[in-house]
Amino acid sequence: QVQLVESGGGSVQPGGSLRLSCAASQNIFRIYTMGWYRQAPGKQRDLVARITSGGDTYYADSVKGRFTISRDNAKNTAYLQMNNLKPEDTAVYYCSAERGSGVTWGRGTQVTVSS
């Protein structure tokens, strides 16, 4: 089973940028749909962005035009570039690897947007 490790979280002021990375343990990474989800305190985990093995992308309305998901199959890594961050983007961000009905999660990385 693939294992995922997120990195790149931190604290940033409103309007700032962060780039999250999700490193996968297996070189069959390329067959998975990769996703980024986030969960704020007291709220459910919501999908932020997703990229298929073929490169098709999906974004939640709240992040369209600000966030970009990408993947580098040679490095077994998915990325989430986050620009123009807002306080409401504050959450723990989780990476997911999806194939068929199975989903594997990373442990998450904290993103805090505050002045």
Image: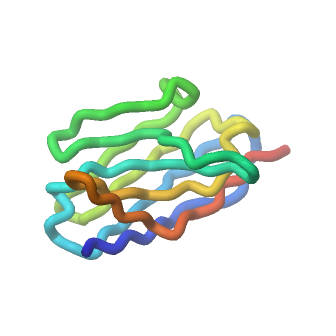
Name the residue: 49% across, 30% down.
Answer: 60
Image quadrant occupied by the N terminus:
bottom left
The answer to which quarter of the image holds residue 93 is bottom right
Judging depth in this view, the residue of 37 and 87 nearest the camera is 37
Say if 57 sits above or below 73 in the image.
above
At a point 60% along the width and 44% down the height, the residue shown is 17
In terms of depth relative to the viewer, which is nearer, 60 or 78?
Answer: 60
Image location of residue 24, percent across then percent down:
31, 69
Q: Position of residue 58 (x, y in %)?
A: 36, 32
Q: Position of residue 63 (x, y in %)?
A: 54, 30
Apparent side of residue 91 relative to residue 31 in the rendered image (left or right): right
Residue at left 38%, top 69%? 4
Q: In the picture, which quadrant includes the C terminus?
A: top right
**Residue located at (14% from left, 66% from top):** 28
Residue 14 picture location, percent across and down: 74, 38
> Left of 51 or right of it: where is 22?
right
Q: Residue furthest front?
A: 101
Which of the pair 96/82 is nearer the observer?
96
Colour scheme shown: rainbow
Q: Is residue 8 above or below residue 62?
A: below
Label tally: 0
